[in-house]
C-alpha cells in the first residue's frame, strides 16, 4: 500500500509540477502573474477528451495535439489581452485583473461548448499492472509519471542546449541586458506563453485519465500555484520539485490521516514552509526590472 501511495503521489505531483512550471515561466520572464493558468489545464483536459473520444485519436496523439492547441491559446492570451493592456499603459495589477476575468470567463465558455457534465476518459489507456519485484503498481500512474518527466526533462534540455531556449533564460535572468544585446523581448515572451500554454495543456490531458474532464476543474491551478510557491516562485526547477512534494503530501495525508483534512494539512505545511523559507526551496530574488 505504501508503494501505491508513493507512485500515485508522484503521478499527481508531476501534473502539479507541469502547472507550477507554467506559472514560473510566465512570472520569471514578465514579472506578472497569470492566475488563469488553471483554466488552461481545464481546457487541456476537455480538448484531450475531444481528441481521444470524439475524433478517435490515440492517447499519445491526443496529448500532442492538446499541447499544440493549448500553446496557441497561451499565445493568443498574451497577444490579444496582455500585450494590448501593456501598450495602453497597464501595469501588473491590470494584468492580474485581466487574468481574473479569464479565470471567471473560461469555465463558462467551456460549459457552453462541452456541457456541465463530468466527462470520463476511456479506461483502456493503460490498464496493466506493472510488477517491480513483489510490488504491483498502476500502469496508468507509471505512464503519467514517464510522460510528465519526459516533458519536464525535454523542456530543461531545450532551455539549456538550444539558442531559443538560452535566449528565454537570458530574458528571465536579466530582461534589460538581454534587450541591450539584441534579444527580441516581445518575440521570446510570446514563445514563453506558448510553452506555458503547452505545459498546462499537457497537465490537463494527463489529469483526465486519472480523474475526469470537466468545465470546473480549473481549481487544480491552486495546487500548481502552491507547488510553484513551495519550490520557489519563478524557479522552473523548483516548480518541478514543488509539484512532487505537494503530490506526495496530498497522497500520504489523505490516505494515512483523512481525506477530509487533506487540504488543511497540505496548506498548513505550505504556510509552514513559507514561514521558514519565504522564497521557497529554490527561491530567487525578484528582479527590480521585472515589472
Image: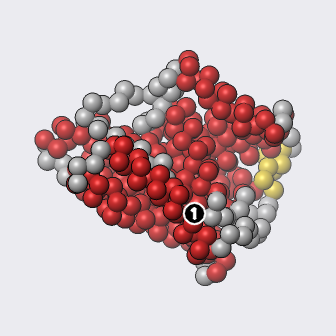
Residue 165 lies, in percent from the top left, at: 33, 49
> Image quadrant of residue 288?
top left
Q: Is residue 96 above or below residue 191?
A: above
Q: Position of residue 147 (x, y in %)?
A: 59, 55
Q: Residue at x 61, y 82 (%)?
A: 55
Residue 150 visible here: no
Front residue of 247 and 287: 287
Residue 7 horizontal side relative to residue 112, left or right? right
- Residue lying furthest top: 276
For the image shown, how many numbered marks are present on the structure?
A: 1
Quadrant in which residue 275 is drawn: top right
Q: Is residue 34 above or below residue 268?
A: below
Front-most of residues 235 and 261: 261
The answer, for residue 137, to whether it is visible in the render is: yes
Q: How is the image coloured?
A: secondary structure
Relative to 287, is 197 on the left or the right?
right
Name the side, left or right, on which 48 lies relative to 190: right
Residue topped by disc 1 = 107
Secondary element type, mark 1: helix
Determine the residue positioned at 65% across, 73% down.
Answer: 115
Amino acid at each position: 500500500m505504501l508503494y501505491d501511495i508513493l507512485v500515485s503521489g508522484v503521478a499527481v505531483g508531476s501534473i502539479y509540477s507541469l502547472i507550477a512550471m507554467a506559472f514560473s515561466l510566465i512570472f520569471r520572464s514578465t514579472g506578472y502573474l497569470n492566475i488563469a493558468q488553471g483554466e488552461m489545464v481545464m481546457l487541456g483536459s476537455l480538448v484531450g477528451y475531444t481528441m481521444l473520444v470524439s475524433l478517435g485519436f490515440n492517447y499519445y496523439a491526443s496529448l500532442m495535439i492538446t499541447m499544440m492547441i493549448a500553446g496557441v491559446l497561451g499565445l493568443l492570451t498574451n497577444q490579444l489581452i496582455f500585450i494590448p493592456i501593456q501598450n495602453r499603459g497597464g501595469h501588473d495589477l491590470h494584468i492580474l485583473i485581466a487574468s481574473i476575468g479569464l479565470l471567471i470567463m473560461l469555465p463558462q465558455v467551456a460549459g457552453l461548448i462541452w456541457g456541465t457534465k463530468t466527462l470520463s476518459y476511456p479506461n483502456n489507456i493503460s490498464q496493466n499492472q506493472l510488477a517491480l519485484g513483489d510490488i504491483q503498481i498502476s500502469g496508468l500512474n507509471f505512464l503519467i509519471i514517464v510522460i510528465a518527466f519526459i516533458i519536464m526533462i525535454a523542456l530543461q534540455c531545450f532551455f539549456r542546449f538550444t539558442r531559443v531556449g538560452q535566449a528565454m533564460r537570458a530574458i528571465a535572468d536579466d530582461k534589460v541586458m538581454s534587450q541591450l544585446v539584441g534579444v527580441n523581448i516581445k518575440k521570446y515572451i510570446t514563445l514563453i506563453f506558448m510553452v506555458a500554454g503547452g505545459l498546462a495543456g499537457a497537465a490537463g490531458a494527463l489529469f483526465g485519465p486519472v480523474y475526469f474532464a470537466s468545465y470546473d476543474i480549473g481549481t487544480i491551478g491552486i495546487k500548481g500555484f502552491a507547488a510553484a510557491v513551495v519550490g520557489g516562485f519563478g524557479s522552473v526547477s523548483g516548480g518541478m520539485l514543488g509539484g512532487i512534494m505537494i503530490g506526495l503530501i496530498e497522497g500520504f495525508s489523505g490516505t494515512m490521516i483523512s481525506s477530509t483534512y487533506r487540504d488543511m494539512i497540505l496548506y498548513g505545511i505550505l504556510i509552514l514552509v513559507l514561514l521558514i523559507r519565504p522564497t521557497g526551496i529554490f527561491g530567487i530574488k525578484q528582479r527590480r526590472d521585472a515589472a
